[in-house]
Image: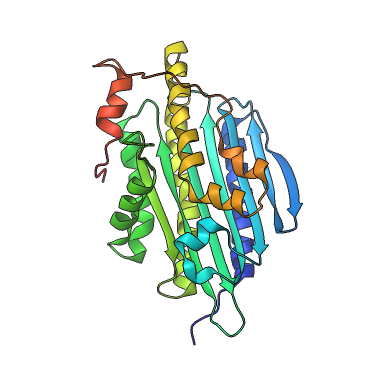
C-alpha cells in the first residue's frame, strides 16, 4: 500500500513558510508591515497578508488558504475528469511582489497541495507550484542567479527535473494572445505525485524555501538604482501583461474564483497601479526594446 498523504504536516509547513517570507520581506523593506486578514468561508479559510506603500515594495501579497468542497469546479474537472464526484481539499501559499522601483523585478511564487477522496477509492493527490520572475529592466547576471538557484534546488531530485520544470514554466507563463512571455521564467510544476508522498513533499518544500534565496539577492543589488518617469511608465505598461495573464490563463485564479474562494484574497496578486497603451512599441536600441529582444524569448540561462 502506498504511503498516505500527511495533510497536517503540509499545512504546518505552508503556514510557517508564509511567516518566514513575510518576516524577510518586512526586514528588507524596512518601512511597511504586512496587514493580516483572517477570513473564513463555508469552503474553508485562510490568512491573507498584504504590505502596501513600503520603502521598496509598492505592494506585496502573501496568502495562505485551506479550502474544501464536495464538487470540483469546471476548471478542475476539465483538466482532471477523474475528480468528478470526489470531495476535495486544497491548501497553499501564493505570493506576488510588486516593487516600486522599475529596476526591481516583480516576482511570483506558489506552492500547493491537493487531495480528492471518495469512499472505496484511493485518494487522488498531488503537489504543484513554482516561482517566476518578471523584470522590466533586466540584468543578465540577475536572471542567471535566479535560474541557478532553481537548478540547484532541483538537482537532488534528478538531473532532468530543472530542464523539465523550467520548460513548463516558459510554456505556462506565456501570453498566447500577445505571442510573448510574461517574464524570464523559473520553475513550474503540477500534478506531482510520482515517487511517493515524502519525495514529492520534499520537493515542494525545496521550491518554497528556495524563493527567498532566488529573489532577495536581486533586491539587494538593484534597490538603490535611480529611476524616473520613463522607467515608471514602462513598468506600469508591462504590469498590464501581468493582469492579462492572471485573468485569462492562470489556473489558480480561475480555480479560486470558480470554487467560491475569497475574491479579495485571490486577486491580491494584482498590481496597485497599471496602464495600457494602444499599439505601443519600444524604440529600437532602447533598454525597453532589449527586454523584448533579449530576455522575453525563452532561452537556457544556466
Name the residue located 55 percent from the left edge and 31 percent from the top edge: 271
Name the residue located 33 percent from the left edge and 46 percent from the top edge: 170
Q: Quadrant of residue 112?
A: bottom right
Q: In the figure, 106 relative to 15: above or below?
A: above
In terms of depth relative to the viewer, which is nearer, 8 or 255? 255
Q: Quadrant of residue 34?
A: top right
In terms of depth relative to the viewer, which is nearer, 286 or 213? 286
Name the residue located 59 percent from the left edge and 75 percent from the top edge: 117
Residue 141 lies, in percent from the top left, at: 31, 35
In terms of depth relative to the viewer, which is nearer, 285 or 215? 285
Check the image and name the residue furthest to the bottom: 1
Q: In the figure, 97 relative to 258: above or below?
A: above
Residue 61 in sight: no
Residue 109 in sight: yes
Q: In the figure, 58 relative to 277: above or below?
A: below
Residue 85 lies, in percent from the top left, at: 59, 72
Amino acid at each position: 500500500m502506498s504511503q498516505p498523504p500527511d495533510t497536517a504536516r503540509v499545512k504546518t509547513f505552508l503556514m510557517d513558510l508564509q511567516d518566514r517570507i513575510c518576516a524577510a520581506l518586512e526586514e528588507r523593506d524596512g518601512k511597511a508591515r504586512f496587514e493580516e486578514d483572517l477570513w473564513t468561508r463555508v469552503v474553508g479559510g485562510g490568512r491573507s497578508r498584504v504590505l502596501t506603500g513600503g520603502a521598496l515594495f509598492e505592494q506585496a501579497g502573501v496568502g495562505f488558504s485551506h479550502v474544501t468542497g464536495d464538487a470540483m469546479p469546471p476548471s478542475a474537472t476539465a483538466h482532471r475528469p477523474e475528480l468528478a464526484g470526489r470531495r476535495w481539499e486544497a491548501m497553499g501559499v501564493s505570493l506576488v511582489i510588486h516593487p516600486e522601483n522599475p529596476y526591481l523585478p516583480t516576482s511570483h511564487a506558489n506552492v500547493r497541495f491537493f487531495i480528492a477522496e471518495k469512499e472505496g477509492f484511493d485518494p487522488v493527490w498531488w503537489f504543484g507550484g513554482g516561482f517566476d520572475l518578471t523584470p522590466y529592466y533586466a540584468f543578465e547576471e540577475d536572471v542567471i542567479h535566479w535560474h541557478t538557484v532553481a537548478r540547484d534546488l532541483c538537482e537532488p531530485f534528478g538531473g532532468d527535473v530543472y530542464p523539465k520544470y523550467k520548460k513548463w514554466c516558459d510554456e505556462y507563463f506565456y501570453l498566447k494572445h500577445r505571442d510573448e512571455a510574461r517574464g524570464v521564467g523559473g520553475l513550474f510544476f503540477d500534478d506531482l505525485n510520482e515517487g511517493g508522498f515524502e519525495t514529492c513533499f520534499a520537493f515542494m518544500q525545496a521550491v518554497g524555501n528556495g524563493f527567498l534565496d532566488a529573489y532577495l539577492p536581486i533586491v539587494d543589488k538593484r534597490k538603490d538604482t535611480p529611476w524616473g518617469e520613463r522607467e515608471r511608465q514602462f513598468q506600469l505598461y508591462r504590469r498590464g501583461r501581468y493582469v492579462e495573464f492572471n485573468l485569462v490563463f492562470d489556473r489558480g485564479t480561475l480555480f479560486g474564483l470558480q470554487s467560491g474562494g475569497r475574491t479579495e484574497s485571490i486577486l491580491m496578486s494584482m498590481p496597485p497601479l497599471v496602464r495600457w497603451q494602444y499599439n505601443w512599441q519600444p524604440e529600437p536600441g532602447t533598454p525597453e526594446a532589449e527586454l523584448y529582444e533579449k530576455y522575453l524569448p525563452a532561452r537556457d540561462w544556466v
